[in-house]
């Protein structure tokens, strides 16, 4: 089984400091700060990266489960919104919104497989302590 890595560096105090995040593959390197995490400052933040990971994982899991159910997806577009409560210092909610183009599937089967994918994707399982909502639309 592959093990994936990422690195983070932080310098100085929480509010004055700054850091950098880098994926082990080298495909992403970016800065983060108090302002990019708790305000509208430039740079990324851990929650945004979790959202990207969750959207990507769900999309792949949905594709796999659709294929296993006998359907071939043309496209699955997923957006994830991750809510960080600064008072609790906790991620309290993740909202997955998916729009998919799946030929020859009815709405009930589509929704059933979407929920299976939400519950079955590895990132959803890793984040099981967070309220994860799903809105799935068939295009």
Image (cartoon, rainbow, N blue to C red):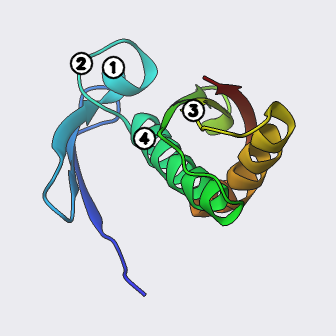
Which residue was labeled with disc 1?
35
Residue 107 position in % (x across, y down) = 80, 32
Q: Nearer the viewer, mark 3 or mark 2?
A: 3
Q: Nearer the viewer, mark 4 or mark 3?
A: 3
Which residue was labeled with disc 4?
52
Q: Is residue 40 visible?
A: yes
Q: CA distance from mark 4 to mark 2?
A: 17 Å
Residue 25 position in % (x across, y down) = 18, 64
Which quadrant of the figure contains the C terminus? top right
Q: Nearer the viewer, mark 3 or mark 1?
A: 3
Residue at x 34%, y 72% (from the top left corner): 4
Q: Of the residues under marks 4 and 3, which one precedes in the sequence?
A: 4
Q: Are marks 4 and 3 in contact (CB under 8 Å)?
A: no
Q: CA distance from mark 4 to mark 3?
A: 17 Å
Q: Nearer the viewer, mark 4 or mark 2?
A: 4
Question: Neighbour class for label 3 at 10 Å: few (<14), some, many (≥20)?
Answer: many
Q: CA distance from mark 1 to mark 2?
A: 7 Å
Query: Which of the two residues, 26 or 40, is positioned nearer the viewer here?
Result: 26
Which residue was labeled with disc 2?
42
Which residue was labeled with disc 3?
100
Q: Is residue 128 visible?
A: no
Q: CA distance from mark 3 to mark 2?
A: 31 Å
Q: Secondary structure at mark 4?
A: helix
């Amino acid at each position: 089984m592959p093990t994936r890595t990422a690195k983070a560096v932080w310098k100085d105090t929480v509010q004055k400091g700054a850091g950098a995040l880098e994926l082990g593959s080298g495909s992403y390197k970016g800065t983060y700060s108090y302002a990019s995490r708790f305000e509208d400052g430039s740079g990324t933040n851990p929650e945004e990266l979790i959202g990207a990971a969750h959207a990507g994982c769900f999309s792949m899991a949905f594709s796999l489960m659709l294929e296993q159910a006998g359907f071939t997806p043309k496209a699955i577009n997923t957006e994830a919104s991750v809510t960080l409560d600064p008072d609790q210092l906790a991620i309290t909610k993740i909202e997955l919104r998916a729009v998919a183009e799946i030929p020859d599937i009815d709405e009930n089967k589509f929704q059933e497989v979407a929920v299976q994918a939400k519950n079955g994707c590895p990132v959803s399982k890793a984040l099981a302590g967070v309220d994860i909502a799903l809105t799935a639309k068939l295009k």
